[in-house]
Amino acid sequence: MTIYQRTLSRPVACTGIGLHSGRRINLCLRPAEPDTGVVFKRTDIPDSPLIPGDVNAVVSTEMCTTVGSGGACVATVEHLMSALAGVGVDNVLVEVDAPEIPVMDGSSAPFVFLLKHTGLKSQDQPRKYFAVRREVCVSEGDKFLKVLPADHFSVDYTIEFDHPLIRRQRMVYSQKNGSYDRQLSRARTFGFLSEFRRLQEANLALGGSLDNAVVVDDYRVLNDDGLRFDDEFVRHKVLDFVGDMALVGRPIMGAFVAHKSGHALNNKLFRKFLADPQAWQLVSPEAAPLDFEAAGALAMPQQAVA
């Protein structure tokens, strides 16, 4: 199990397109001191404040998760946050010269590659975990998200769309070292052609294309290479969930159940969880099970598609 906090061995950088702006964006990840967490800095803004990667710094959940502080914002942080959690990075400075993180191929796999390429190093401070002590639940209509006490992280996630390619998909993940990369990181964001056209007419999603999203019309996938997984849609929702959960700042030992959840409901649950001191307890690595690994190292899923 991972006892000590981790950061990058050295800086690593990449360039990509912004999903919403369509502009070229430069991103650099730098090592950070223990207990720093994930912090963002807008290099295109003089004297930009540091923006904490924290659930309470979330300023918008419309179409993506956006964090902000002191008038500076960074959107579409969820895929990068998911990769950081999946690889097990606790402390990092994220420098970006735009108001959003580049979308890359629509998944977190390019970020996982960067993190593995640069390498990680252990630090001299132990990692702490949130142990769930009682159920916390949020809901909106037929959508809900809850977390229950458990001795490891798991998420049981169900989506429902009135589309012949999706319908109802369910995936259950439990935590186990190494599986995030194999089972989750390559799942891409997805959207519907009609919605995509509407957004672009409103000067939104200007960088969206078949190179960085799965796009479906009324009956089929428009991408020439098809789907990477038969259930890529729900896998990506779990990828997003892991990224939103990483904004809590520490790994969580708890069993999550999600039904048609999204960025807004995810953030609502995590804020409610942290605000209730009776719902959690900070525990040391020694109190965590031996198979409890880095924040997002998710196991081979059980799955059911209906």
Image: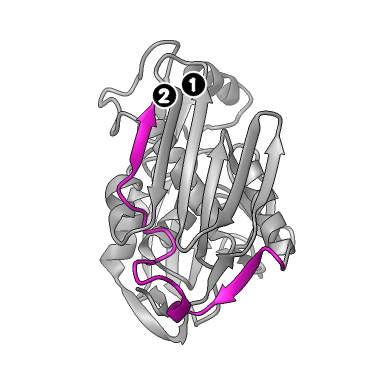
Compared across the picture, whether 50 is left or right of 300 comes to right
Depicted 118 relative to depicted 212: above or below:
below
Occupied quadrant, residue 263: top right
The outermost residue toward the bottom is 124
Closer to the chain start, of discs 1 and 2, is: 1
Q: Give the residue at x 65% y 38%.
A: 62
Question: Magenta stretch containing residue 75, yes or no?
Answer: no
The percent position of residue 108, horizontal first and vertical second, equals 39, 49
Depicted 91 relative to depicted 202: above or below:
below
The local crowd at label 1, few if under 14, some if 14 to 19, many if 20 or more residues have their Cα within 10 Å, is some
The percent position of residue 64, horizontal first and vertical second, equals 58, 42
Occupied quadrant, residue 202: top right
Label 2: which residue?
A: 215
Label 1: which residue?
A: 192
Q: Nearer the viewer, residue 129 or 105?
A: 129
**Residue stretch rendered in magenta on the structure:** 278-306
Q: Give the residue at x 33% y 56%.
A: 112
Q: CA distance from mark 1 to mark 2?
A: 6 Å
The local crowd at label 2, few if under 14, some if 14 to 19, many if 20 or more residues have their Cα within 10 Å, is many
Occupied quadrant, residue 42: bottom right
Q: Give the residue at x 50% y 63%.
A: 253
Contact, CB < 8 Å: mark 1 with mark 2? yes
Task: Name the dominant secondary structure of the magenta segment.
Answer: loop
Asked if one can make out residue 38 in the rendered structure from this viewpoint, the answer is no
Q: Nearer the viewer, residue 147 or 223?
A: 147
User: Looking at the rendered structure, which numbered label has been put on residue 63?
Assistant: none
The percent position of residue 225, horizontal first and vertical second, equals 25, 27
The percent position of residue 152, horizontal first and vertical second, equals 45, 61
- Residue type at mark 1 is Phe
The colour style of the image is one colour
- Residue type at mark 2 is Val
